Image (cartoon, rainbow, N blue to C red):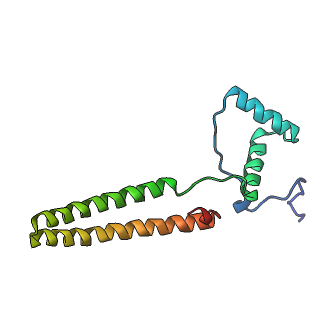
Amino acid sequence: MANNKKNKGGAPSKPDEQKKKKEIKIRLTETQYYFILNHAEAAGYKQPGRFLSVMIWRLVADGKFTYAVHETISSQIVNQLMRIGNSLNQAMRAYHESGDPENLDEFEYLLMKNESAIDIAARRVGRVRKVAARLGRDDEL
């Protein structure tokens, strides 16, 4: 029997992990679209999407494309710590105004209660640092 596999020509097929199966749609104004189209054609690309893909990966690889990962997380952490500080200040003020040891007990209770919130905030900061380090952005923290 003859081998039924025929050489169809063309490039060899890629393994599944190298195939580009996902896509992202973007909306552009007409001006933006023609701007990209003109640059793609000038660079020798027939497909503007392919041009954008290559440009994005080149910018990222060269380190010219940067973004802040930690800003929103950091503001959340700062807000949480400010709330904790306000609670502790109120409890300590109540103790100082009254001199009542029960208020000191309340302060100690709030300290212990907020200790876990501070630990959570510290873990979040640690995760942000890890992400920033992976992205080469740890010098900004």
Q: Compared to 50, does 72 lie above or below?
A: below
Q: Residue at x 45, y 65 (%)?
A: 124
**Which image quadrant: the C terminus?**
bottom right
Q: Is residue 134 left or right of residue 88?
A: right
Q: Is residue 124 left or right of residue 32?
A: left
Q: Is residue 10 left or right of residue 87?
A: right
Q: Residue at x 85, y 36 (%)?
A: 41
Q: Compared to 56, does 25 lie above or below?
A: above
**Which image quadrant: the N terminus?**
bottom right
Horizontal and vertical percent for residue 103?
A: 13, 68
131 and 99: which is toward the camera:
99
Q: Residue at x 73, y 60 (%)?
A: 18
Q: Compared to 11, does 23 lie above or below?
A: above
Q: Compared to 20, does 94 lie above or below?
A: below
59 and 94: which is toward the camera:
94
67 and 91: which is toward the camera:
91
Horizontal and vertical percent for residue 8?
A: 88, 53
